[in-house]
Structure formats: structure tokens, C-alpha cells
Image: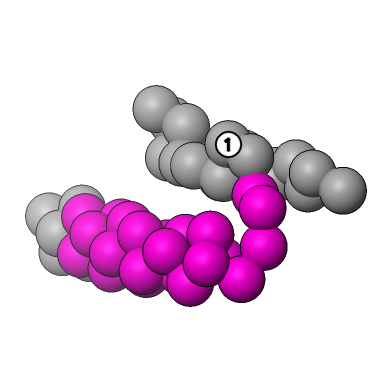
Amino acid sequence: MLLLKISLSLFFDKLYDQFWRRYHEVLRRSFCFQDLSIGESGVLKSPTIIV
């Protein structure tokens, strides 16, 4: 059961990472976002919008 949870969380981490990479590209083309990146802990840093 624990192994299933670990593999699921790894799967979702990978999915989340891919999603944010793709989304980051779209956002970068649309707006001027500064430092929209995933921190080492996997937590999304809040984007700073340059106006």
C-alpha cells in the first residue's frame, strides 16, 4: 500500500512538473513573468509580474 502511494506521488510529481514546464512556456510568451519556477522542494514559487 505504501509502495503504491509512493509510485502515485512520483507519477503526479512528474505530471505536475511537465504541466508547469508547458504552462511556463505559454505564460512566458503571453506575459513578462519573472522567476516562475518550481523550487527544489517542488513547491511553486509565486510568480512576480513585471509591469
Q: Residue at the spot x=53%, y=59% of the render?
A: 28
- 12 with respect to 30 (left or right): left
Q: Is residue 15 left or right of residue 16?
A: left
Residue 17: x, y in percent? 33, 57
Magenta segment range?
9-33
Instruction: Specify whether 29 is left or right of 49.
Output: left
Dominant secondary structure of the residues highlighted in magenta in the image: helix
Q: Is residue 46 above or below residue 31?
A: above
- Taking the view exactly as shown, the residue that stands out farthest to the right is 51
Query: Could you tell me residue 39's position as x and y percent?
Result: 47, 32
Q: Residue at x 39, y 27 (%)?
A: 40
Which kind of residue does numbered mark 1 sit on?
Answer: Asp
> With 24 as the anchor, is 2 left or right in this view?
left
Instruction: Find numbered disc 1 in the image and state the secondary structure of the residue it sits on.
Output: loop
Q: Is residue 27 magenta-colored?
A: yes
Residue 51 vs 20, above or below: the answer is above
Q: Residue at x 47, y 60 (%)?
A: 24
Q: Does residue 41 appear in the picture of this structure?
A: yes
Q: Work out whether residue 6 or residue 27 is closer to the camera in this orientation and state it.
A: 27
Q: Residue at x 79, y 44 (%)?
A: 50
The residue that mark 1 highlights is 35
- Choose between 39 and 1: the one closer to the eye: 39
Q: Is residue 45 above or below residue 12?
A: above
